[in-house]
């Protein structure tokens, strides 16, 4: 029972980050909710395989990322910017809304890295683990994303 409570507490702490990541990848609130639910179920089923409890957060996000990619494969379509324009912005006014819309304008690979790094506070190494890429690749994607964001934001001012 103690392990179940620990798991529940951990999942509740990550709830917003999970939804934000799923929305960043999928761009659809229904799919994001489904992915988060499936990821939680999978994580609970695979909890005995978790080696270190300190690694729970990146481990859970990796499971969520895999589930999001599975949904994308099943969907087999590209999400248009029009479909993701309703993504929730982080509170803070017009500037943050403009920034969030620019983030939504990035391709899925760059958007996932930006959301994990800037919105959810994961390190480059953790993002690499979550997305199944190298830390160097994370840095490259962040650099490309910053460049694209700069162009998108300068064009809108």
Image (cartoon, grey):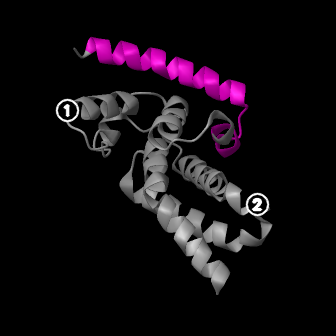
Disc 2 versus disc 1: nearer the observer:
2
At horizontal 55% and vertical 53% (from top left) the residue drawn is 71
In the image: residue 103, left or right of residue 154: right
At horizontal 58% and vertical 62% (from top left) the residue drawn is 39
Q: Quadrant of residue 19?
A: bottom left
Is any atom of residue 82 visible in this view? Answer: yes
Label 2: element kind: loop
Residue topped by disc 2: 52
Q: Where's the C terminus, which quadrant? A: top left
Q: Give the range drawn in magenta.
A: 127-155
Across and down, in percent, residue 12 comes to 48, 67
Is any atom of residue 37 visible in this view? Answer: no
Q: Quadrant of residue 101?
A: top left
- The answer to whether residue 73 is magenta is no
Across and down, in percent, residue 64 comes to 58, 55
Q: Where's the N terminus, which quadrant? A: bottom right
Q: Residues within 10 Å of mark 2 (few under 14, many from 20)?
A: few
Q: CB of mark 2 within 8 Å of CB of mark 1?
A: no
- The answer to whether residue 129 is magenta is yes
Label 1: element kind: helix
Distance, label 2 to label 1, CA atoms, is 41 Å
Residue topped by disc 1: 94
């Amino acid at each position: 029972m103690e392990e179940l409570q620990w798991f529940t507490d951990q999942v509740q702490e990550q709830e917003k980050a999970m939804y934000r990541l799923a929305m960043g990848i999928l761009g659809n609130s229904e799919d994001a909710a489904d992915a988060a639910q499936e990821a939680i179920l999978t994580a609970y089923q695979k909890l005995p395989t978790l080696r270190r409890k300190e690694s729970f957060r990146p481990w859970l996000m990796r499971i969520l990322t895999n589930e999001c990619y599975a949904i994308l494969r099943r969907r087999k379509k590209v999400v248009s910017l029009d479909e993701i324009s309703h993504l929730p912005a982080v509170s803070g006014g017009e500037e943050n809304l403009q920034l969030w819309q620019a983030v939504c304008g990035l391709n899925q690979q760059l958007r996932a890295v930006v959301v994990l790094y800037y919105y959810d506070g994961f390190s480059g190494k953790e993002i690499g683990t979550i997305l199944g890429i190298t830390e160097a690749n994370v840095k490259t994607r962040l650099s490309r994303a910053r460049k694209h964001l700069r162009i998108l934001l300068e064009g809108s001012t």
